[in-house]
Amino acid sequence: MGDFSHLGVFDVIFCRDALIYFAAEQKRDVLHRAARCLAPDGYLILGAAV
C-alpha cells in the first residue's frame, strides 16, 4: 500500500484479481496512484473480478 511512483512511468498496467481483496476506499487509492504512473497514452487494464 506504499507509494509506487518511484517505479517510473508505464505504458500498460495490468491489475487482475488483486483489488477484490481491498475495501472501496483502498481500491480508489490504489487506482489513483496507478493512474499517476501511467504514460499519457497508457492503458490501465482491469480484470473482471474488480
Image (cartoon, rainbow, N blue to C red):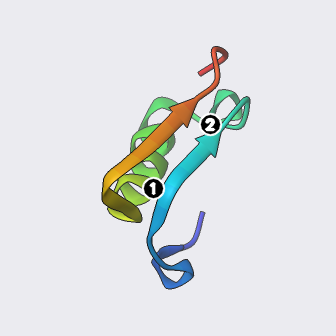
Residue 16: image x %, image y %?
69, 33
Left or right: 12 as drawn, with respect to 48? left
Q: Position of residue 33 (x, y in %)?
A: 40, 59
Q: Earlier in the sequence, mark 1 or mark 2?
A: 2
Badge 2 element: loop
Name the quadrant of the N terminus.
bottom right
How crowded pointer 1 is (Cα within 10 Å; few <14, some 14-19, many 20+) is rated as: some
Identify the residue at image location x=62%, y=36%.
Answer: 22
Say what amino acid the circle numbered 2 marks.
Answer: Phe
Q: Residue furthest left?
A: 40
| Residue assigned mark 2 | 22
36 horizontally vs 50: left or right: left
* Residue at the top extreme of this rendering: 48
Residue at numbered disc 1: 34
Three-letter residue code for mark 1: Ala
Please say if 17 is above or below 49. Answer: below
Q: Nearer the viewer, residue 50 or 41?
A: 41
Image vertical order of residue 18 relative to residue 40, above or below: above
Residue name at image x 63 percent, y 35 percent: 19
Q: Is residue 7 above or below residue 13?
A: below
Q: Where does the C terminus fall, quadrant-wise?
A: top right
**Position in image of residue 45 (x %, y %):** 53, 34
Q: Residues within 10 Å of mark 2 (few under 14, many from 20)?
A: few
In the image, 17 versus 25, the foreground residue is: 17
Kindly identify the residue that appears in the image at 63 percent across and 14 percent down.
Answer: 48
The residue at the point 45 percent across, 55 percent down is 34
Q: CA distance from mark 1 to mark 2?
A: 15 Å
Residue 29 point in image, percent of width and height: 41, 50
Whether residues under marks 1 and 2 lie with C-beta atoms below 8 angstroms apart, the answer is no
Judged from the image, the secondary structure of the residue bearing numbered disc 1 is helix
